[in-house]
Image: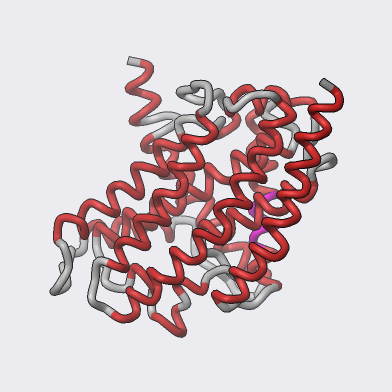
Amino acid sequence: MSAVIALVIFPGGVCILLAGMLYEWFDRKLVARFQDRIGPRWFQPLADTVKLLAKEEVVPDGVNAQLFFVLPVIALAGAMTAALYVPVFGLAPSFSFSGDLIATIYMLSLLTLCMGLAGANTLNRFSLLGATRTLTQLFSYEAPFLLALLGPAIVAGSWRISAIADYAADRWLILTQPIGFAVALIGLMGKLELPPFDAPEAETEIVAGALTEYSGRGLALFHLGRGVELVVGLTLVAAFYLGGVTNPLWFAAKTLLLLIGLAGVQTLLTRLRIDQTVGLWWRYGALLVLVQFLALILWEGVIA
């Protein structure tokens, strides 16, 4: 019974969806205030979701209808499954096993993969271009993001998220692995396609990118999945680099501080071209985090 409650209500299911909408609102509100705008009211993400769920789902011509409907479901399911293995809300993960870090990173990639396939499944030129940019950007940041999260795993000597968080409980790994922290946080922005890494959905160029042809329930599920991924990503970075999980309220404050940092970056920087994004990740991000990763492996070998 407890497993069912964890899956459906708390900390997964309904609560993680509401948390995703809350963090989305907070991010949009912060960016608006930094830009001297009012921003959305607190219930706006919920109102948008209800509106989209109530709208008719229009299937464009020339698409695989089954794939068109199932991709948003897989995207949301992947993000919500990842939430079960991380200490969301500062609580112990609902489920845990050796190697769940790798499984969680894979689940977080499903959203981007589904968005790319969704755009490639249509005949719309904007969707196809958005899908190309989405998958190109995915292959750029995924390896550095993975290495950045594996850094704490190396020093903790475990691939289990709960064990890594326990190891980091009295250690602020941001002090010893600053490059990994920066790459993980910026990589999360790339996964969520937040400015300046929003070229795949640049509304002034390609309408809504890969999701141009989506409306109604499909679009709502993609948006919900992105909100859940935001919560899971911030939870992982805070648990690994900012002193682990000690107090739920203090841990929630740390994730919100990270969100403030993301909002600041979105406000300060303009959109990068897709070639600039690829060059940034492979010339600098991947190289720097790889050097730190190799240094950690050598250091662990020396002290062992």
Classify 203 as above or below 54. Answer: below
Is residue 250 in sight in this rendering?
Answer: no
Q: Is residue 58 above or below residue 157?
A: below
Task: Residue at 44%, 79% (x, y): give it.
Answer: 203
Q: Which residue is at 70% across, 65% downward?
A: 283
Instruction: Note whether residue 174 is visible.
Output: yes
* Residue 197 as seen in the image, left or right of residue 84: right
Q: Is residue 68 left or right of residue 244?
A: left
Quadrant of the snapshot with the C terminus: top right
For the N terminus, the quadrant is top left
Which residue is found at the position 40% from the left and 25% from the top?
6
* Foreground of the two, 266 or 89: 266
Residue 18 appears at what percent x and percent y?
A: 43, 44
Q: Quadrant of residue 269?
A: bottom right
> Magenta residues?
258-263
**Percent position (x, y) of residue 54?**
21, 59
Number of numbered discs: 0
